[in-house]
Image (spheres, rainbow, N blue to C red):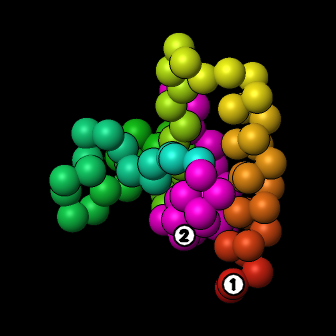
Amino acid sequence: PNNLNVCFRGVDAEHLTVALDTYGVCVSYSSSCRTLKEDSTSYVVEALKPECKGSSIRFTLGTSNTQADIERAIQALKKAVIQVTQQV
C-alpha cells in the first residue's frame, strides 16, 4: 500500500530519476528485486504494460511522509518531466 509505480510513456525513467534527485525527490526506476542485475527494468511492468518498460518510476512512502512532502514531490515531478522531455 505504500508503493506507487507510474509510467510516463516516452520519458526515459533513468533520466527522470536523476532530474527528480536534483529537486530532492528520491524515486527508483528499477524493480527492487532487480537493482543488482544488468537489466534492472521491472519484468512485472514489462509483463503488464510493455510500452512502459523504461518509462516507469516507483515512489515509496513511509509513515514519516506528510501531505506537504507529497505536494512537493508532485511539483518537482512536473518540473522534472518537462526538463527531461525538453532534452530529447
Using the image as rendered, state which of residue 8 and residue 21 is in the foreground: 21
Q: Earlier in the sequence, mark 2 or mark 1?
A: 2
Asked if the residue under mark 1 is in contact with the one under mark 2, i.e. CB atoms within 8 Å, the reply is: yes
Which residue is at 36% across, 44% downward?
31
The answer to whether residue 85 of the structure is visible from this angle is yes
Residue 12 found in image quarter: bottom right
Is 5 included in the stretch rendered in magenta?
yes
- Say what secondary structure mark 2 lies in: helix
The image shows residue 74 at horizontal and vertical percentages of 76, 43
The residue sitting at 72% across, 52% down in the picture is 77
Q: What residue does disc 1 label?
A: 87
- Give x and y (percent) for residue 23: 65, 57
Q: Kindly identify which numbered label has been placed on residue 15.
A: 2
Count neighbours of disc 2 (C-alpha within 10 A) and say few if under 14, some if 14 to 19, many if 20 or more: some
Q: Confirm whether residue 52 shows in the render.
A: no
* Magenta stretch holds residue 32: no
Q: CA distance from mark 2 to mark 1?
A: 10 Å
Camera-side residue: 72 or 40? 72
Question: Seen in the image, is 39 located left or right of residue 43?
Answer: left
Q: Which amino acid, mark 1?
A: Gln
**Of 68 and 54, the residue lying toward us:** 68
Looking at the rendered image, the quarter that the C terminus falls into is bottom right
Query: Closer to the camera, 86 or 51?
Result: 86
Q: Position of residue 6 (x, y in %)?
A: 62, 43
Q: Amino acid at mark 2?
A: His
Crowd rating for badge 1 (residues with CA inside 10 Å; few <14, some 14–19, many 20+):
few
Question: What span is in magenta?
Answer: 1-24
Which disc number belongs to residue 7? none
Question: As drawn, which residue projects farthest toward the bottom?
Answer: 88
